[in-house]
Amino acid sequence: MKKLWKGNEAIAEAAVAAGCRYFFGYPITPQNEIPEYLSWRLFEVGGAFIQAESELSAINMVYGAASAGARAMTSSSSPGISLKQEGISYIAAAELPCVIVNMMRSGPGLGGIQASQGDYFQATKGGGHGDYHCIVYAPSTVQEFVDIIYNAFDVADEYRNPVMIIGDGMLGQMMEPAEIPPMKDTSKMFEKYHKDEWATCGHSDGKPRIINSLRIEPDENEEFTLRLYKKYEEIAKKETKVEEYRMDDAEIVFVAYGSVARICKAAIVELREQGIKAGLIRPITLYPYPTATIEKAAKSDKVKKFVTVEMSMGQMVEDVRLAVNGKKPVEFYGRCGGNVMMPADLVKYIKEGK
Amino acid sequence: MKIIADKPKMLTETPTHYCPGCTHGIVHRLIAEVLEELGKTEGAIGIAPVGCAVYAYRYFNCDMIEAAHGRAPAISSAVRRVVNPDNIIFCYQGDGDCASIGMAETVHAAMRGENITVIFINNGIYGMTGGQMAPTTMPGVKATTCIYGRDPKVYGNPVHLSEMLATLTGPAYIERVACYDVPHVKKAKAALKKAFTVQMEKKGLSFIEVLASCPTNFHMTPIEAMEFVKTQAEPFYPLGVFKDITKEEN
Ligand SMILES: Cc1ncc(C[n+]2csc(CCOP(=O)(O)OP(=O)(O)O)c2C)c(N)n1
Ligand code: SF4
């Protein structure tokens, strides 16, 4: 049944439904409703919550719970996500599954608390040190956030890789009708974890298990990294997700994700009413990136140009340019600092070029 | 022939990489012996630090998690909530790990009164990175980042971590021990046994600080390094029990 949910709370309940039983976090606007909700909810379902002393500690608690074979998550917003980066690199390198939510606010520095997409580079290009990637989703509605997080723990488990879901203050704070899927059966989940070869849960079959990311021999570390990248290739093949909106006859192609994609859709409706054939490519996964979809559009005779729209100074636009590879012009329209563009701004930009 | 002393099974066959005269090896063995004597090797989970003991995960014959530098108490706090409450969980940390970069994690795990045991190896120096000043380097002692000796006016003061943690409500047992001679090794073993017993009784965080040697970075022979702990470190870091809630309860 659909109910009116505040974004952050819907996300928290969907994580519980997905089988998440452990949450570790530190307060920061605009994601506070996630820890607030889970601080009581997890105890109702036999899990646990810790308000950590810092984001640094919180992500390492996630590392610990995941090591022991539990479904664990943390959430934060931009400055807090920066603090988590060391831990995320360790989680990727120890091949532990977990889910990290970033409700982005504007940076750099302490910045502001309004919606932003300034953490695209950080989320998709590593963020922490070394060669690794999170699987990154960017939902654009509360319902989509719910559905993605519901599935995210399974994806994290399957590849033993951290999943990051990035939203922004708008998505976290808005209220929208959403349906939370049914509770997953966790009993078998945990059974499986504890039987799996790797979880350091103090099992007693006499074969000690080790969770580790130290590979001090260059050959060993290279071999491991090559294996990680094989995994990323497989993830790219199987997990890439993208929405194409009114692309059949589109001449002008917006590329946008998250909340901004919704603004683009409104602009597209308005532009089409005025006789301008606009469409949208909306990456749902930011890593792996839907490069092939953009490549295909770049090759189409109909498409005249791409306009990447972001709440940043232009981060994803670099991936769009790589995909388009000079075949068509790629323009950029952005607002930053916590400001949001209006559909009318985009209509004006397309018609007047500014 | 009768075997009267043997290597604990809780230690793996892997030879340790520690320098001759280093305390890390002694403390590893004590932990292993104590867990065997308490019958708690099964299900034990250890958290290894970043520091000279980084390879602790190769030496203990139980599930081991290698932590990022300083984060072992945070990791173990989460593990505590996931696994069976009867499983022993221990963090093994150096002074840079536990009292500098991971100070917040140490203090907050202690504040929460996590039912874990933290073994804190205070050798007064950064061993692994080559002898830099530690948060526990004593005034006047030379390190590669205070080459004329630690002048507290310039380089700040060292920390007495056991005393500091003893001011908190959360910890159940705190003791500082040394390992420079056989009687002290025996006392250290008794302290570890007490610490793990406190955890078995689910009384909260137990914390054992071990005054340790680092002959390599103090440029000493193993014997000189032990002598240094006895004559220099112990007077500055007095041995003893700083907190024991089992006593308060009696
Ligand atoms: C985030 C981070 N900073 C710095 C280091 C480098 N580092 C490795 S071990 C260490 C100090 C270890 O000293 P201590 O904890 O006293 O242990 P010991 O080697 O003396 O046993 C440092 C600074 C690191 N690995 N990670
Ligand atoms: S450098 Fe010091 S602490 Fe490290 S193994 Fe050698 S003696 Fe031990």
Image (spheres, coloured by chain):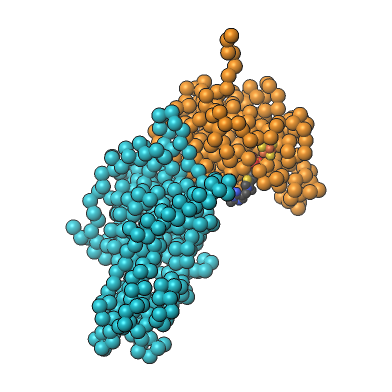
Chain colours: A cyan, B orange
Q: Is residue B232 left or right of residue A262?
A: right
Residue A133: x, y in percent? 45, 58
In depth, the one of A75 and B60 nearer the eye is B60
At 39% across and 53% down in the image, what residue appears?
A99
- Residue found farthest to the bottom: A352
Residue A24, x across and y down, in percent? 42, 49
Along the line of sight, which residue is nearer the eye, A268 or A248? A248
Query: Which residue is farthest top?
Result: B1
Q: Where residue A343 sits in the image (x, y, percent)?
A: 33, 80
Residue for point 71% across, 44% down: B131
In the rendered image, the vertical position of residue B182 relative to residue B145, given as above or below: above
Q: Residue furthest left?
A: A1
The x, y position of residue B74, in whole percent, is 50, 44
- Along the line of sight, which residue is nearer the eye, B57 or B88? B57
Residue A296 in view (yes/no): yes
Indicate the quadrant containing the N terminus of chain B: top left, top right, bottom left or bottom right: top right
Extreme-right residue of the structure: B148
Compared to A327, does B132 lie above or below?
Answer: above
Res. A53 in view: no
Left-right relation of B92 to A175: right
Residue drawn at x 77%, y 42% is: B141
Q: Is residue B212 left or right of residue B61?
A: right
As drawn, B200 above or below A2: above
Residue drawn at 30 percent across, 66 percent down? A141
* Residue B28 placement: quadrant: top right
Q: How many labels were placed on the picture?
A: 0
Q: Would residue B14 be found to the left or right of residue A208 on screen? A: right
